[in-house]
Image (tube, rainbow, N blue to C red):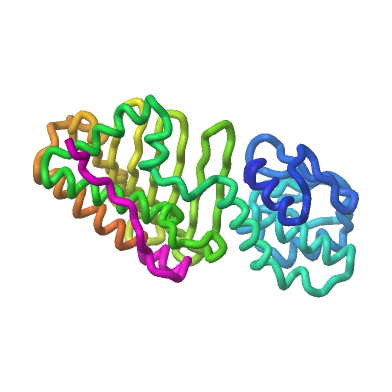
């Protein structure tokens, strides 16, 4: 959990962003790395309830900063909470304890849904990669050249890449409503750089969009409990624009890259060669499989059809 995410949780409770929040005699502030610190007395009864009710492997609510699921022996004066979900259940259970409400614990999913929506709103998810690249002169100089497609195969590849980008970030399709999202959302926004990820609760498949001064990273990650772990990247940085297919299975890690800027293709640690028609068809075919997989995840979580995907068109000379 980062400071941006802490602020979004607190915004849902009615607080404006600040460096330190005080609730029920406890101070909540970010440590500058990956967790929120809760400083102040948490009564033993409440601490024990939280310990027994919530799986620490999931919620990461750490007593006295311990990395193990420590059992409270009395009142607790310091917690380290690593996850948005952990902070939400801690806050709602504390509210329930102090105000003796019987409803808060039942509203956890609804509250988390509100937090995820706030996170997504804060990272401007509706910006497409096409628009992001064109709003900066350094990026624009390169990216405008991709509109001048020289062959039918290259144009087909560009359309497939655009479709991949638009399904990994489904919110750049204007028919999708932020409030309809059932994804687990993470995000951050600072000094013109931002990122967000959407994870399917059941499969753990994660869709990630990163936008920064150099360019972007679009990433689809399929976790290791599938037949094999797979990550597919579309990114642009100082080395150019790249499509990469990374797979981890019983034989180890393999990564194949196609650099569209210099038209090279090959294994990440191997010798690259000039991309052939066969190589480009390989990229198109595998991106198509990824689009199908990501589409199924998006439809399940958003629940409406995907339309209005923006595809790059050839420039008319």
Q: Percent position (x, y) of residue 105?
A: 75, 69
Q: How many labels does the image show?
A: 0
| Residue 259 visible in the picture | no
Query: Which residue is drawn at the image coordinates 17% and 31% (left, top)?
Result: 272
Residue 302, magenta (yes or no): yes
Taking the image as shown, residue 124 lies to the left or right of residue 296, namely right
Q: Percent position (x, y) of residue 178?
A: 53, 59
Quadrant in which residue 150 is drawn? top left
Secondary structure mainly formed by the magenta segment: loop
Q: Residue furthest front?
A: 317
Query: Which residue is drawn at the image coordinates 37% and 29% (left, top)?
Result: 139
8 vs 192: above or below: below
Q: Percent position (x, y) of residue 65?
A: 73, 44
Q: Percent position (x, y) of residue 130?
A: 36, 42
Query: Which residue is drawn at the image coordinates 18% and 49% (left, top)?
Result: 156
| Quarter of the figure that contains the C terminus | top left
Query: Which residue is drawn at the image coordinates 70% and 49% (left, top)?
Result: 81
Residue 259, magenta (yes or no): no
| Residue 128 visible in the picture | yes
Taking the image as shown, residue 151 lies to the left or right of residue 49, namely left
Comparing 93 with 177, the one in front is 177
Taking the image as shown, residue 268 lies to the left or right of residue 52, namely left
54 vs 134: above or below: below
Q: Which residue lies furthest to the left in this view?
A: 277
Q: Over which residues does the magenta segment extend? A: 295-317
């Amino acid at each position: 959990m980062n400071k941006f995410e802490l602020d979004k949780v607190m915004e849902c409770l009615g607080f404006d962003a600040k460096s330190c929040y005080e609730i029920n005699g406890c101070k909540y502030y970010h440590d500058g790395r990956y967790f929120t610190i809760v400083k102040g007395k948490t009564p033993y009864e409440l601490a024990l309830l939280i310990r027994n009710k919530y799986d620490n492997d999931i919620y990461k609510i750490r007593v006295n900063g311990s990395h193990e699921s420590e059992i409270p022996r009395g009142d607790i004066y310091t917690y380290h909470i690593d996850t948005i979900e952990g902070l939400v259940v801690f806050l709602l259970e504390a509210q329930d304890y102090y105000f003796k409400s019987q409803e808060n614990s039942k509203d956890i999913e609804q509250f988390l849904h509100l937090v995820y929506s706030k996170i997504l709103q804060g990272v401007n998810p509706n910006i497409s990669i096409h628009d992001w690249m064109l709003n900066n002169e350094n990026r624009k100089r390169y990216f405008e050249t991709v509109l001048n497609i020289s062959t039918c195969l290259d144009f087909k590849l560009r359309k497939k890449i655009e479709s991949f980008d638009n399904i990994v970030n489904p919110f750049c399709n204007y028919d999708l409503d932020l409030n309809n999202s059932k994804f687990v959302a993470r995000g951050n926004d600072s000094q013109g750089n931002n990122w967000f990820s959407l994870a399917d609760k059941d499969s753990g498949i994660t869709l990630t969009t990163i936008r920064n001064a150099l360019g972007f990273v679009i990433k689809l990650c399929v976790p290791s409990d599938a037949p094999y772990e797979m990550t597919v990247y579309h990114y642009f940085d100082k080395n150019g624009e790249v499509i990469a297919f990374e797979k981890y299975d019983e034989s180890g890690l393999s990564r194949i890259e196609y650099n569209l800027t210099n038209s090279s293709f090959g294994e990440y640690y191997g010798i690259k060669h000039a991309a052939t028609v066969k190589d480009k068809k390989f990229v198109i075919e595998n991106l198509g499989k990824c689009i199908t997989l990501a589409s199924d995840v998006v439809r399940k979580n958003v629940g409406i059809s995907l339309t209005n995907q923006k595809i790059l068109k050839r420039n008319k000379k």
